[in-house]
Amino acid sequence: MKVTFGRKIKSHMLKYSEQDRQKILNFAIHVQEHGLEILPGKNKRSDGFSNDDPLFSSKMALVKKYNLWHYHIGIPSYTNSFYGDYKTSEYILHYIRGEDYIEIVDLGRHPPFSLPSHDCLEEPP
């Protein structure tokens, strides 16, 4: 599977610690070699909003438009989940998922869960 990086996260990579950059690059290499299977962290579509969220419709429209997913990258470390056989972490990697590619677009804290900003998703004209 092809892996690319969005322009905004590329510009931020140098601000991350060496350890965090390595975790992001290890994820990219894993996806290139094995796809999105057998990952230690929780990996899911970014559509888990409450129906009571006043921005539910606009958030879901963004998730659908870009097919947004997120992966618990293990930054700063992994924690075993009480809800399943996966691990979670304080930081998640946001990506656009295509049929045979992903584009990594942002790194964010979770909780609270928020989608990547528009400037992470849209290329300049």
Image (tube, helix red, strand yellow):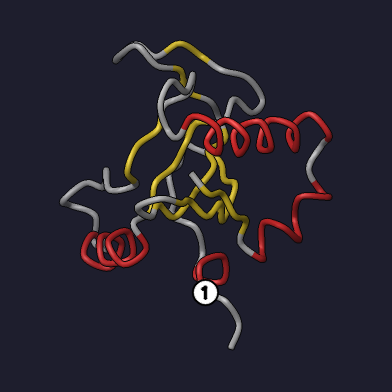
Name the residue: 48% across, 51% down: 102
Residue 110: x and y in percent read: 49, 37
The residue at the point 27 percent across, 61 percent down is 64
- Residue occupying the far bottom of the picture: 125
- The image shows residue 108 at horizontal and vertical percentages of 57, 45
Give the residue furthest to the left.
51
Between 29 and 106, the one nearer to me in the picture: 29
Q: Toward the viewer: 30 or 23? A: 30
Q: Looking at the rendering, which quadrant does residue 58 occupy?
A: bottom left
| On screen, residue 74 above or below 123 | above
Identify the secondary structure beneath mark 1: loop
Residue 43 against residue 59 in the figure, above or below? above
Estimate the x, y position of residue 99 in percent, counting from the top left.
Answer: 35, 52
Where is mark 1, residue-wise?
122
The answer to which of 33 and 111 lies nearer the viewer is 33
Which residue sits at x=72%, y=57%? 10
The residue under the point 60% across, 46% down is: 107
Disc 1: CA contacts within 10 A as few (<14), some (14-19) or many (>=20):
few
Q: Is residue 77 above or below residue 65?
A: above
Quick one: quadrant of the C terminus? bottom right
- Number of labels in the image equals 1
Instruction: Name which residue type carries label 1.
Output: Glu
